[in-house]
Image: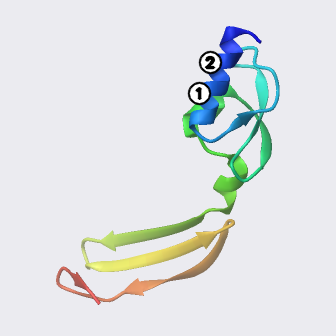
Amino acid sequence: MALAQQVKIKELSEYGFKLLSSYKNLDTEIKLSCKNNHEFTITLKEFRKSLKCPICKQTESHKTLALDNATNITGYAIIQDGKLLDYGLIKSKGNKLF
């Protein structure tokens, strides 16, 4: 096994990924597997931008808080699998939420 491939295998394993194909260069697609056994194809250059499995990333829950400084209204949204599960306003009194 080439030294470059051994180095990339070590780098990927530090982030919890397995290299399932041979490595050629940064711009050539490789096949990876994440800790949840999702398999995907990506270039190492693109992978380094997020260091995440694109399949896991799609299924993560996102919770968002927003504050309107003009009105001191705080809102939230919970999104999972690209679908809005819940949203609403959080009542506040001064700087305290309740």
Residue 58, image x, y percentages: 68, 57
Image point (79%, 41%), residue name: 40
**Residue 34 coordinates in the image, percent (x, y):** 70, 45
User: In this image, 25 relative to 93: left or right?
Assistant: right
Residue 70 visible in the picture? yes
Cα distance in 3D space between marks 1 and 2: 6 Å
Query: SS at mark 1?
Result: helix
> What label sits on residue 7 in the rendered view?
2
Q: Amino acid at mark 2?
A: Val
Task: Tell me the element at label 2.
Answer: helix
Label 2 Cα crowd, 10 Å radius (few <14 / some 14-19 / many 20+): few
* Residue 5 percent coordinates (x, y): 70, 16
Q: Quadrant of the C terminus?
A: bottom left
Nearer to us in this view, 30 or 77: 30
Q: Using residue 88 as the reference point, say whether residue 39 is left or right of it.
A: right
Query: Which residue corresponds to mark 1?
Result: 11
Q: Is residue 28 above or below residue 15?
A: above
- Compared to residue 50, the image places residue 38 above or below, namely below
Residue lying at the far left in this picture: please name it. 94
Q: Is residue 65 above or below residue 89?
A: above
Q: Name the residue located 25 percent from the left edge and 71 percent from the top edge.
A: 69
**In the visual, does 38 lie left or right of 17?**
right
